[in-house]
Amino acid sequence: MKYKNPTAAVYLVSAIAGLSIFGDGLLYSVLPLYASELGIPLAAVGVVLSINRWVRLATNPLAARSFNRYGVYWPLLVTMVLSVITTFIYSRAWGLFVFLAARLVWGLCWSHIRLGGFLVIMDASTAALGFGMGIFHVLTRLGSAFTSSVGSFFVDLWGYKTGLTLIAGLSSVGILLVFALGRIMESSHHAEAPRTGKTSGERPARHKPELSPLICNAAGFTNSFVGSGLIVSSLSLILQQRIGDSATLGTVTLGIATISGLVLAMRWASNLVVSPVTGKIIDRMGRRSPFLALVYAMVILLSVFAATRNPVMTVLSACLLFIAGNALEVLLDAAVSDNAWISENRNARISQYTSFYDLGAAVGPIVGYAIGVRFSFTAPFYLGALLMALVIGLYVSERGTQRRAASRVTQ
């Protein structure tokens, strides 16, 4: 597929992704606080927040078939319309099963919108693919940051129903952007099938793998279990327990939904700085030392977040956890790419890693709320610290095995 203005195509599809995620991003801030009003049991909130990730394990292959059959334009248009509809459904108190159905549809939508974005950028940014992907991630994160902060403010100001309805209206701008994207497509709306990549003989020199696929998968699962799962899904409840329904800063009083949204926005906004800085550091220092430093930091920060009752320390440790988690995600993406580059089947290697990552994000809210309802909402964070410590143990064990094997070879 060719575009009359390739740069515009990159920005348009990135903005479409950022707008489509408005409803999903806002739910993490406000659903735990309004679950009872919507007829959703608190114990079911974790399932509601994670079910869209579970369904993506099945809808990702479906998205690939959709784009192969119908091209880029129509799947993007249909799923953008559906994403607006799901956000509107979130604003209604129509019960648990309707809400679950909307979350399943959203999972289907995101599978298509994410893959559609990649396909457009691959065609439009052949000479600067990294920059194109960077724009996609930046605008997606900005969409999440906007809805977590501004959307939560709307909810505090006008109530849940009105706030979500306004966000659905803003998200509908994405439909107009899909129309605009279609207008700059030069030929038919059908895209070529994804290419498998270069043969081993055509591959340029790459960074030598330093973290094994096992470590990448284990750390990816744990990082998403903690960051996308535990913290994002239960942060608003923990802040409410430690701060109350509102907090006054000088002459300004902020509701708990706004405070939670602002803290969650740090997760998305920090990515704008953390991602490029982390990339430069790991290119200079390699993967191992930064990996260990980040995982140790995660163990300490998770323990502090669980143990403290101080509101300021709670917010500070949550923000630092978001920063460390974002940096670890960038590092693991680079490390798994190192392994995939020398693998006979690069797509399978990356798909395996992303499946572990999605699985952690899906399991996190369910485990968090199951333990939280029965014991305490801080208890799951001790579990997260333990899992991170086990990743360190796995890494140390694997390195020891590698050293012993190398010493036997040299003897």
Image (cartoon, rainbow, N blue to C red):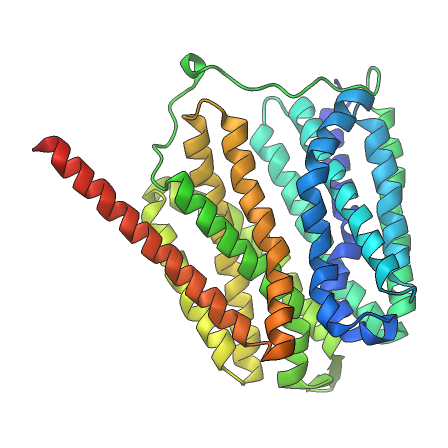
Q: Is residue 327 left or right of residue 296?
A: right
Question: Does residue 104 appear to the left or right of 224 in the view shown?
Answer: right
Where residue 215 appears, x then y in whole percent? 40, 46
Q: Quadrant of the C terminus?
A: top left
Judge from the rendering whether residue 344 lies leftward or rightward of residue 351; answer left or right. Answer: left
The residue sitting at 49% across, 41% down in the picture is 333
- Return the x and y of residue 62 as percentages of the image width and height: 74, 32
> Which residue is depicted at the point 61% across and 18% down?
195
Outermost left residue: 411
Q: Is residue 57 above or below residue 317?
A: above
Between 173 and 56, the residue placed more toward the observer is 56
| Front in this rendered view, residue 170 or 52 | 52
Residue at 45% in and 73% down: 303
Please tell me which residue lies in front, 373 or 232: 373
Q: How many marks?
A: 0
Residue 114 seen: no
Give me the residue at 70% from left, 68% from top. Answer: 261
Q: Quadrant of the N terminus?
A: top right
Q: Say left or right for 325 vs 251.
A: left
Q: Percent from the top left, x then y, of residue 267?
A: 60, 60
Give the x, y percent position of residue 369. 65, 70
* Residue 408 visible in rendering: yes
Quarter of the figure with residue 375: bottom right
